[in-house]
């Protein structure tokens, strides 16, 4: 467990970099999943709400990535660090759960690239869940000295 704690700043930094890669890659999702064509069928307000939610998710991932590039901010054992790492943990654990319990992949685009991208994304989401959970446990004093 002490090895984990010793490497936690680097793991959080890598998580931050991973989230920045995710937001860059996310810019391709609307094209890959044909969002423009699909959302064109929606009422204007529903379409606007959809795009607003997508932008909020993108901005949240960006914020998580940027703050994680400064691991000391998230690993100082303060109530704020515990709250933030707890929220980020819940966010990513929730995203993993949604991937397996809610998404209907029956109409997912075919192809090896899409399948590999999904495996990579899920792997990243699991990594983020585990790293931020470890950071939360550290901030709560459950692990580490």
Image (spheres, helix red, strand yellow):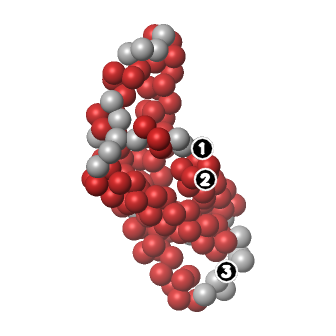
Q: Nearer the viewer, mark 1 or mark 3?
A: 1
Q: Nearer the viewer, mark 2 or mark 3?
A: 2
Please report the residue visible at 56 percent of the width from the left and 62 percent of the height from the top.
129
25 horizontally vs 124: left or right: left
Are there few (<14), some (14-19), or many (20+) residues within 10 Å of tag 3? Answer: some
Residue under label 1: 102
Task: Indicate which disc, 2 or 3, sits on the residue closer to the N terminus.
Answer: 2
In the rendered image, which quarter is residue 26 located in?
top left
Q: Position of residue 133 (x, y in %)?
A: 61, 67
Relative to 132, residue 32 above or below = above
Asked whether 113 or 48 is in front, the reply is 113
Q: Quadrant of the C terminus?
A: bottom right
> Quick check: can you spot residue 85?
yes
Q: Nearer the viewer, mark 1 or mark 2?
A: 1
Residue under label 3: 143
Please report the residue visible at 29 percent of the width from the left and 34 percent of the height from the top.
31
Relative to 4, residue 72 above or below = above
Q: Position of residue 74 (x, y in %)?
A: 55, 64
Task: Indicate which disc, 1 or 2, sits on the residue closer to the N terminus.
Answer: 2
101 horizontally vs 119: left or right: right
Asked whether 70 or 119 is in front, the reply is 119
Asked whether 50 or 81 is in front, the reply is 50
């Amino acid at each position: 467990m002490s090895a984990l704690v010793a490497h936690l700043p680097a793991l959080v930094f890598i998580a931050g970099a991973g989230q920045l890669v995710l937001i860059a890659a996310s810019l391709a999702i609307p094209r890959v999943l044909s969002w423009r064509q699909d959302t064109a069928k929606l009422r204007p307000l529903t379409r606007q709400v959809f795009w607003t939610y997508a932008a909020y998710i993108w901005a949240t991932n960006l914020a998580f990535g940027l703050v994680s590039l400064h691991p000391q901010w998230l690993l100082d054992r303060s109530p704020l660090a515990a709250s933030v790492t707890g929220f980020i943990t819940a966010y990513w654990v929730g995203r993993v759960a949604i991937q397996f319990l809610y998404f209907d992949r029956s109409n997912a685009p075919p192809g090896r690239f899409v399948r590999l991208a999904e495996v990579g994304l899920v792997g990243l989401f699991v990594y983020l869940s585990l790293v931020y959970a470890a950071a939360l446990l550290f901030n709560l004093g459950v692990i580490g000295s």
